[in-house]
Image (cartoon, coloured by chain):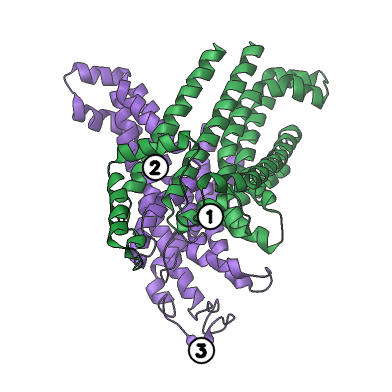
């Protein structure tokens, strides 16, 4: 009974995610205007027939910006997750497979990264890059940083898994058959790391979405006029009360729904393993 | 055995901090714009002064020499001067650290109180509806970005420490609930319950010894989460602590200040994690 309930929630979460991705992909057709188009005569307007979610303080249609922002966050977070997963596979998997000093060195580097609070590390590395860059470059930099820094915890798991695989019977047998080096790693070790890699990939997506939002609110994320959930949530900064302009909370609601959906999708294997 | 463990942790901390410092220095040195100094454009400076400024920059070109020089100064208490605020970094840290320590301390206390209260009642009561409710509450907080919680705390005039508490709470709760649920399912605890032992006695005599060392490890990690949470909370709530300083340094690309802060935060989180590990080891030793 409980399992069936879980499956229902999981299916619903998948539907929500597919729906949101589809809608954001269709932003070009669904949005009444581009994300940067200004309606100067209607700056700071409340929701109306023309502007479903009103306009921001410089007159840009909020609904259009939410659609485009959702697209950026939902497309680039998986891209960053893919990058971090590949890096984890490369560093953690190879270090575990090679063992000895390589594994120790790799783990020392991961320890160093893990000893810093995630947000601290992000803002430090983000600050190294120039802040007054083009919007497109800022998008790339933000998600590249997430991808390049987010691999460490997965690398530890992969290093341990690859280390145990190195001493397993089938790898020994393959080695005895004369298979060595890259071929052994590529054809025998890496396929067995796939479940960990998949898990890491899916876990990273909501984490990166939240990180981008945090960076955006702190003014270190995607640059204007490009929208993202982080830059859209920055609007909450000037609010006086929640009831004042509740439509400004739409990006937050979307973000919570998406992250919750990811967690529901991910919850099943966890429950099953328990 | 214990001393060996402490020594190993000490060595790991020193090595990590030194390596972190070197990486930070490399980051500062290789950052775009490192060679550019606006002071050189000052029309009031004569050519000798400009030449002296260039010479100073040239000396900083070698990363290792630059790092060793910074280390030498740090040993003598000179952490450099903030580029954006024009004040010594040590003075800035001395002024701002107490507020951050207070915020993080109260935040941790609140988060652990909330998390343990909810996890214990969920594990003891074993009512599906209550379990679902606590999971939904913690899950919701987990899905809200830390910076949004900080903004909402400003909006609702809630103290910053509570915002930190709410950011840390769901992470602690998840671990605590799983650990306690597993502990309460252990055969000897089920037997103790069946024999009619009071809940308090079961908790302190049977559950705490089982989950204590693991909870201590979570406590070490929660310090790191709380320190990270201090950045958005202090930045957005206008609290002049180390978190706000880090944010200002990032916005102003004040890399010397930022690297010092990075090393300091690394040291704090490593000490917290190592402390938790050593205490956990001592508890396990006593138990054995």
Q: Which residue is mark 3?
A: A41
Characterize the local packing of mark 3: few (<14), some (14-19) or many (20 or more) Cα atoms within 10 angstroms: few
Identify the residue at horizontal 49%, vertical 48% (top origin): A119
Same subunit, labels 2 and 3: the answer reads no
Q: Which mark is nearer the camera, 1 or 3?
A: 3
Q: Chain A shown in which color?
A: purple
Identify the residue at horizontal 75%, vertical 19% (top origin): B205
Q: Which mark is residue B110?
A: none
Q: Chain B shown in which color?
A: green
Question: In 3D space, how far apart are the residues under numbered discs 1 and 3 (Cα atoms)?
Answer: 41 Å
Q: Chain of mark 2?
A: B
Q: Based on the displayed image, in which of its 4 quarters is residue A24 positioned? A: bottom left
Q: Is residue B273 visible?
A: yes
Name the element at disc 1: helix
Name the element at disc 2: helix
Q: Is residue A99 left or right of residue A239?
A: left
Q: Which residue is mark 2?
A: B24
Q: Which residue is mark 1?
A: A12
Identify the residue at horizontal 69%, vertical 47% (top origin): B133
Q: Is residue A205 visible?
A: no
> Does A256 sit above or below residue B14?
below
Q: Position of residue B15 (x, y in %)?
A: 42, 28
Q: Position of residue A253 (x, y in %)?
A: 57, 62
Q: Chain of mark 1?
A: A
Question: In 3D space, how far apart are the residues under numbered discs 1 and 2 (Cα atoms)?
Answer: 45 Å
> Does A151 sit above or below residue B236?
above
Q: Nearer the viewer, residue B88 or B67?
A: B88
Q: Nearer the viewer, residue B277 or A270?
A: B277
Q: Quadrant of the N terminus of chain B?
A: top right
Q: Based on the displayed image, in which of its 4 quarters is residue B195 positioned? A: top right
């Amino acid at each position: 009974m409980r399992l069936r309930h879980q499956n229902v929630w999981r299916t619903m979460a998948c539907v929500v995610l597919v729906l949101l991705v589809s809608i954001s992909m269709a932003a070009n057709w669904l949005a009444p205007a581009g994300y940067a188009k200004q309606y100067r005569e209607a700056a700071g307007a409340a929701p109306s027939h023309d502007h479903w979610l009103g306009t921001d303080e410089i007159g840009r249609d909020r609904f259009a910006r939410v659609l485009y922002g959702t697209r950026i966050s939902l497309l680039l977070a998986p891209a960053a997750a893919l990058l971090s997963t590949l890096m984890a596979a490369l560093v953690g998997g190879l270090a575990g497979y090679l063992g000895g000093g390589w594994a120790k060195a790799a783990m020392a580097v991961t320890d160093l990264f893990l000893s810093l609070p995630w947000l601290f590390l992000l803002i430090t590395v983000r600050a190294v890059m120039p802040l007054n860059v083009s919007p497109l470059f800022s998008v790339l930099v933000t998600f590249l940083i997430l991808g390049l820094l987010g691999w460490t915890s997965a690398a530890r798991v992969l290093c341990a898994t690859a280390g145990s695989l190195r001493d397993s019977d089938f790898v020994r047998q393959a080695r005895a058959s004369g298979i060595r080096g890259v071929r052994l790693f590529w054809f025998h070790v890496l396929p067995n790391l796939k479940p960990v890699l998949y898990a890491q990939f899916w876990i990273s997506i909501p984490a990166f979405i939240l990180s981008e939002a945090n960076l955006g609110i702190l003014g270190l994320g995607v640059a204007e006029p490009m929208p993202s959930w982080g830059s859209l949530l920055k609007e909450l900064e000037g609010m006086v009360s929640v009831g004042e302009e509740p439509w400004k909370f739409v990006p937050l609601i979307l973000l919570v729904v998406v992250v919750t959906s990811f967690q529901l999708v991910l919850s099943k294997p966890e429950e099953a393993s328990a | 055995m214990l001393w060996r463990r402490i020594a190993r942790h000490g060595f790991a901390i020193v090595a990590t901090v030194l390596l972190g410092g070197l990486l930070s220095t490399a980051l500062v040195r290789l950052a775009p714009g490192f060679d550019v100094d606006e002071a050189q454009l000052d029309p009031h400076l004569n050519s000798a002064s400009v030449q002296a400024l260039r010479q100073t920059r040239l000396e900083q070109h070698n990363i290792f020499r630059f790092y060793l020089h910074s280390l030498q100064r740090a040993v003598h208490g000179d952490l450099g001067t903030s580029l954006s605020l024009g004040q010594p970094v040590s003075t800035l840290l001395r002024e701002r650290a107490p507020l951050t320590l207070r915020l993080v301390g109260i935040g941790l206390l609140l988060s652990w109180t909330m998390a343990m209260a909810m996890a214990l009642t969920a594990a003891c009561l074993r009512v599906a509806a209550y379990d679902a409710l606590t999971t939904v509450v913690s899950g919701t907080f987990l899905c809200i970005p830390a910076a949004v919680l900080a903004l909402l705390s400003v909006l609702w005039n809630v103290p910053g420490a509570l915002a930190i508490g709410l950011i840390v709470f769901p992470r602690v709760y998840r671990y605590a609930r799983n650990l306690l649920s597993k502990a309460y399912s252990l055969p000897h605890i089920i037997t103790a319950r069946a024999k009619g032992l009071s809940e308090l006695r079961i908790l302190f005599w049977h559950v705490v010894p089982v989950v204590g060392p693991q909870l201590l490890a979570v406590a070490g990690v929660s310090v790191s989460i709380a320190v990270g949470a201090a950045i958005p909370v202090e930045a957005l709530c206008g609290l002049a602590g180390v978190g706000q300083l880090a944010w200002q340094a990032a916005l102003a690309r004040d890399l010397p200040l930022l690297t010092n802060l990075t090393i300091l935060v690394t040291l704090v989180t490593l000490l917290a994690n190592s402390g938790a590990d050593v205490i956990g080891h001592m508890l396990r030793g006593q138990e054995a």
